[in-house]
Image (tube, rainbow, N blue to C red):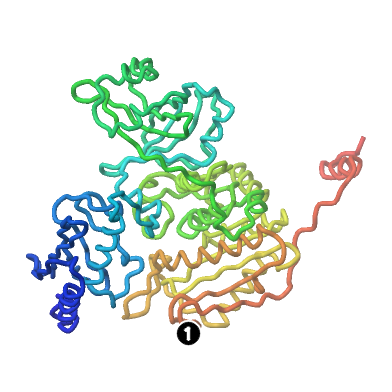
């Protein structure tokens, strides 16, 4: 829709405002309204200041008056420091960030005159107009397609080094079309690093070696180079001569005593000369506290994730983001293309065991992890020794998370939890994604896991669960002749998120924020749920006992029992 046709009154008001402005001020010497090829309304104006003429064009966007008119100079002129490059738009009093639809194009021209006059006072001296522009880092980097990410602490690690030094560095590089992002991974020769990045490494990156050149010399000849061929680089910058004798020319970071930092990747041009590719340095700050979790207490705990499918993969990734660093991942499945619809993993994982791919995924989120993986399904046809080892490893964890929706797996996890007196949580999505169940069992607070599950099953039966009909897909629910409900990624993510909160509540210790230990969470108007997010707490009754802690026995008691079992007399 053409705005000036849809709002003809506003269009006439815009013209009247220009006429009034020209009658009021003699600095506005010309106003001519026209339209562009796409019927955009356009106003050519001429401003006079200090005897100099400034022809401008005011272009009304198709989204006017929701967004401001664009004020440009005619031609590739640089009129102001408050301008987006030669020939670019003037940054005026009203911008997209503070725009008011009542502002007219004439008011924009008046603002442009104020800017031009402010930077050109009558005494002939140049002057600066205070800037109200607050650019973000992301905004500054829109046109910086080659970037070097420097984690917090990298430069500080050089404080004890010599002021004149050449230090080896390693980098990883990711590419997207014509863009490159380099990540500083270490400073110092391999095995003698003075700094190693604490940040996760990008997945499947390119690798590059290079050097940091610390110098007290003025390196303006390099720092002011805009990029491209630099034929006599070794001669003009002797400090680089020895590095350019290497078969592969390096990635260079120059740190001057003045604090100036310059980054170039040096490659060979077609003519065989040094070709400098400039990189913009992006200094990353220390990881901000963006999680409500008590990271210190959470990081001390080891969590077993049994089942690395749609729910398990999401729970594991969320726990890693919340501070968990120690995991035991248990699953025998291979990640296939069909798993992409609901899993945390992506196409890189196709063909890999889920536990291995999920371990890599966690490593992409956080560093300093301790992850054990077991490619086994609990209760499957595997060696008894291997099954025993896996179950003991599960029992040694501080929290057991079963998200297999498999009764055999649940029973074995429940036994390990009861035997080792470890808390356990589990979660499942109802067929068709109509909702799900999350539950926990804590030693001596809740009934043991099996008793808790039985109470939940009885509660569901009492409410006449609607998903007895068989389907080939565990996430699908038949509805007779109507289209089936199918759980999608959003449904799974909701249940996984609630399960994660339940897990973190246990890992952080202290008073729980959940008054109940089991919940039925609705995601659709179905069964007992009146609407999405209709939540039903499930009251659990005390029943059953957890395994008592093993008592201390002296050597004589142990010897007596062993001889009794072996039908021998103790010596």
Left or right: 36 in relation to 514: left
Residue at 39 percent of width and 28 percent of height: 252
Name the quarter where the N terminus is drawn. bottom left
Q: Is residue 468 visible?
A: no
Q: Nearer the viewer, residue 534 or 432?
A: 534
Q: Position of residue 487 (x, y in %)?
A: 40, 68
Residue 469 position within the rendered picture, expressed as x and y whole percent measured from the top left: 42, 75
Closer to the camera in the image, 535 or 119: 119
Dot 1 alpha-carbon crowd within 10 angstroms: few under 14, some 14 to 19, many 20 or more: few
Closer-to-camera residue (356/89): 89
Q: Position of residue 457 (x, y in %)?
A: 59, 74
- Occupied quadrant, residue 476: bottom left
Residue under the point 52% across and 58% down = 315
In the current view of this chain or complex, which residue is farthest to the front?
123
Give the vertical position of 409 relative to 41 (above or below). above
Locate residue 316 relative to residue 221 in the image: left or right.
Answer: right
How many numbered markers are drawn?
1
Question: Which residue matches tag 1?
Answer: 530
Numbered disc 1: secondary structure: loop
- Position of the C terminus, as image quadrant, is top right
Residue 166: x %, y % from top left: 46, 22
Q: Is residue 417 above or below residue 433?
A: above
Give the quadrant of residue 178: top left
Q: Can the viewer see residue 131?
A: yes
* 378 sits left or right of 215 in the view: right
Q: Nearer the viewer, residue 535 or 80?
A: 80
Q: Is residue 522 left or right of residue 269?
A: right
């Amino acid at each position: 829709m053409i705005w000036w046709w849809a709002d003809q009154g506003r269009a006439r008001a815009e013209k009247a405002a220009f006429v009034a402005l020209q009658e009021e001020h003699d600095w506005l010497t010309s106003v001519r309204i026209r339209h562009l090829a796409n019927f955009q309304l356009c106003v050519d104006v001429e401003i006079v200041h200090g005897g100099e003429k400034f022809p401008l064009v005011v272009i009304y966007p198709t989204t006017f008056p929701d967004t401001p008119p664009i004020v440009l100079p005619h031609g590739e002129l640089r009129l102001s420091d408050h301008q987006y490059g030669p020939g670019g738009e003037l940054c005026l009093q009203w911008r997209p960030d503070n725009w008011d639809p009542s502002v007219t194009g004439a008011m924009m021209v008046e603002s442009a005159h104020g800017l031009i006059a402010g930077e050109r006072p009558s005494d002939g001296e140049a002057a600066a107009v205070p800037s109200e522009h607050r650019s973000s880092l992301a905004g500054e980097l829109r046109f910086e397609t080659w970037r070097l990410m420097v984690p917090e602490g990298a430069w500080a690690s050089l404080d004890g080094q010599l002021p004149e030094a050449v230090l080896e560095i390693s980098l990883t590089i990711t590419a997207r079309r014509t863009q490159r992002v380099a990540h500083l991974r270490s400073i110092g020769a391999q095995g003698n690093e003075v700094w190693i990045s604490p940040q996760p490494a990008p997945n499947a990156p390119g690798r590059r070696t290079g050097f940091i050149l610390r110098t007290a010399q003025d390196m303006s000849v390099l720092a002011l180079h805009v990029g491209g061929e630099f034929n006599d680089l070794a001669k003009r910058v002797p400090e680089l001569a020895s590095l350019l004798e290497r078969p592969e020319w390096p990635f260079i970071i120059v740190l001057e005593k003045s604090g100036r930092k310059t980054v170039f990747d040096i490659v060979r041009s077609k003519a065989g000369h040094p070709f400098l590719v400039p990189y913009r340095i992006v200094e990353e700050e220390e990881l901000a506290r963006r999680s409500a979790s008590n990271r210190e207490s959470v990081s001390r705990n080891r969590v077993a994730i049994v089942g690395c499918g749609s729910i398990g993969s999401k729970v594991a990734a969320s726990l890693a983001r919340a501070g968990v660093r120690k995991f035991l991942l248990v699953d025998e499945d291979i990640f296939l293309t069909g798993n992409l619809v609901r899993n945390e993993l992506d196409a890189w994982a196709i063909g890999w065991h889920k536990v291995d791919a999920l371990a890599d995924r966690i490593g992409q989120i956080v560093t300093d992890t301790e992850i054990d993986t077991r490619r086994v399904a609990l209760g499957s046809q595997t060696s008894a020794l291997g099954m025993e080892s896996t179950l003991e490893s599960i029992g040694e964890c501080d929290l057991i998370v079963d998200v297999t929706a498999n009764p055999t797996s649940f029973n074995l996890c429940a036994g390990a939890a009861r035997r080792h007196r470890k808390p356990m949580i589990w979660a499942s999505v109802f067929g068709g994604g109509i909702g799900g169940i999350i539950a926990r069992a804590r030693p001596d607070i809740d009934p043991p896991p099996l008793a808790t599950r039985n109470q939940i099953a009885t509660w569901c039966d009492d409410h006449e669960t609607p998903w007895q009909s068989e389907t080939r897909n565990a996430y699908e629910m038949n509805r007779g002749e109507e289209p089936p409900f199918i759980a999608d990624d959003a449904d799974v993510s909701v249940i996984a998120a609630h399960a994660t909160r339940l897990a973190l509540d246990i890992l952080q210790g202290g008073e729980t924020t959940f008054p109940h230990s089991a919940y039925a969470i609705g995601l659709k108007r179905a069964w007992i749920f009146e609407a999405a997010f209709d939540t039903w707490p499930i009251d659990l009754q005390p029943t059953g006992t957890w395994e008592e802690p093993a008592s201390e026995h002296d050597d004589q008691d142990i010897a007596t029992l062993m001889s009794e079992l072996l039908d021998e007399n103790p010596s």
